[in-house]
Amino acid sequence: MKGNHQQASLLSALSKQNLIPLESIDDISTDFVGKNIPFIRFLVENKSIDGNSIAKVLSKSFGYPQIQLANFDTSLVPDGVRNEKLITKHNALPLYLRGKVLFVAMSDPTNLDALEEIQFNTGYSTELVLCDEKSLQACIEKVLEDESGALDISDIDADELAGIDVQESRKEEDNANGEDDAPIVVFINKILLDAIKKGASDLHFEPYEKSFRIRFRIDGILSEIAKPPVSLSSRMAARLKVMSKLDIAERRVPQDGRIKLALSKKKSIDFRVSTLPTMWGEKIVMRILDSSSAMLGIDMLGYEAEQKEIYMEALEQPQGMILVTGPTGSGKTVSLYTGLNILNTQERNISTAEDPVEINLEGINQVQINNRAGLTFPSALRSFLRQDPDIVMVGEIRDLETAEIAIKAAQTGHLVLSTLHTNSAAETLTRLLNMGVPSYNVASSVSVIIAQRLARRLCPQCKEEEPLSEMQLAEQGFPADKLADIKLFKPVGCTHCTGGYKGRVGVYEVIKISPTIASIIMEGGNSLDIANQCQKEGYNNLRQSGLIKAMNGMTSLKEINRVTSS
């Protein structure tokens, strides 16, 4: 009976969008009886209904995001979730992890049993993304073909990792202090594995006068993981520097390096490493570079429908400038890389100047800035413009010279994407003016500004309703006409999450530069004038967008208060 109900729900959704004639529903149901294949596959193979059209209709009807799997890199599928029995049984493919959330591609949104069984077997919370049936089958076949060479990271221990390829140099310096560092090697390997398993974004090794601590940043929050003896801090620093191809004898100046940790022939993890001399030794921070984040697709980032439409329209323009702004760690790079992946076709020449290049993107010409060698943002941009570019991405606009070249490119038939460190969209425009960019250049070149933050998602397993009075809701800025219907949730904490939260979601302010906003810029208006006009034109600021996320039960009011100003 349950299968019949699910089948009826699918047919009803498809008939409402005229993909299936209403009078054919009974015949389709009859024809499907006895077929030992998934219902969506039956419709595609036997009723000649386009799979992509089905996915679009079901995405709209059931409220799940749609993902295009045609160019999906199957090496990104986590090794520990490649369960052939579950994948074939449910016609469902786990795609990637974001924190502790496993995204699962399916063509049938009614098959919630699949999500529950995958969650039970993997230990991860699951979220469904819809896809075209044929692309799903192609991906499943490729993943299962590669399964024989896959490696389950949960089965690796620190001793085994010591024998796996860690790209490093000068191994003879590994024991430069004359001591046996085998325990140090195993301990650091364990720390790196723990960070990957827990979904950490950064690792901090911090020496102090009488203590030494190691912290992970998980879902944007730092927490202490270990406190090794302070006497080991210099030996750990030396080991990490050797792994990162850094000069272990140099302890007076900061250094930057990179570690490529190969877990198997097909699976590797990149770490960006930064050292900093402090009073009591070298603090080392490692950032885990998650290549899967660049493949998420715009539907997975948390944009509201209107915000997504503005961004997509800007990406389709042949020229102009798209600016993404926010503090360090707010997800700016992911937003830019997602846009670049949408634009990355054989017909386009795309070049990026980055400092550093965080994730390698196939088909895009990425340049690593090297100021010491004279390869700066301005010099890279000048070279780009001599190489027939269609799209240019500048990692960050830091000075007037970079801003002027980027704006000139946007005014001469190129689409330019870049970032700035400001607190809001309106402040981004005034920041450019304060750099010395003429107001008419700002008004004529900038097309869209995206300000963003990352808020922690509430754990769906343990979140509880948080009762607040209408007066309290009004004080927080919730819409006056919805106060009676608002239901908020708060974190609790369970074995499935960290303090009641699991994963993160983007909070965005997306502003399209209208003629009126352009006039305010030309007339020398300040950020407050621009922000007021944005409100008049109906654009949600960061706070308003955050409150929408809270009303939808995705995060808590406390978390929105943490990442946005009231």
Image (cartoon, rainbow, N blue to C red):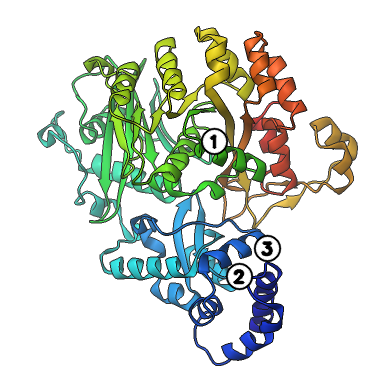
Q: Nearer the viewer, mark 3 or mark 1?
A: 1
Q: CA distance from mark 2 to mark 1?
A: 36 Å
**Mark 2–mark 1 CB contact (< 8 Å):** no
Please name the residue that numbered disc 2 is placed on.
112
Badge 2 marks a residue whose secondary structure is helix
The residue type indicated by label 2 comes to Leu
User: What residue do we see at 44% from left, 70% from top?
Assistant: 134
Residue 435 visible, this orientation: yes
**Mark drawn on residue 314:** 1
**Which x, y percent locates residue 259?**
27, 38
Badge 3 marks a residue whose secondary structure is helix
Badge 1 marks a residue whose secondary structure is helix
The residue type indicated by label 3 comes to Ser
Which callout, 2 or 1, points at the residue further toward the start of the chain?
2
Of residues 259 and 156, the one nearer the viewer is 259
Say which quarter of the image contains residue 137: bottom left
The residue type indicated by label 1 comes to Ala
**Which x, y percent locates residue 478?**
81, 36
Q: Nearer the viewer, mark 2 or mark 1?
A: 1
Of residues 366 and 442, the one nearer the viewer is 442
**Which x, y percent locates residue 281?**
32, 20
Q: How many marks?
A: 3
Of residues 532 and 522, the one nearer the viewer is 522
Which callout, 2 or 3, points at the residue further toward the start of the chain?
3
**Mark 1 crowd level (few <14, some 14–19, many ≥20, 10 Å Cα):** many
**Mark 3 crowd level (few <14, some 14–19, many ≥20, 10 Å Cα):** some
Q: CA distance from mark 3 to mark 1?
A: 26 Å
Q: Using the image, determine if residue 25 lies above or below residue 13.
A: below
Please name the residue that numbered disc 3 is placed on.
61
Say which quarter of the image contains residue 468: top right
User: What residue do we see at 39% from left, 58% from top?
Assistant: 78
**Quadrant (top left/top right/bottom left/bottom right) for the N terminus:** bottom right
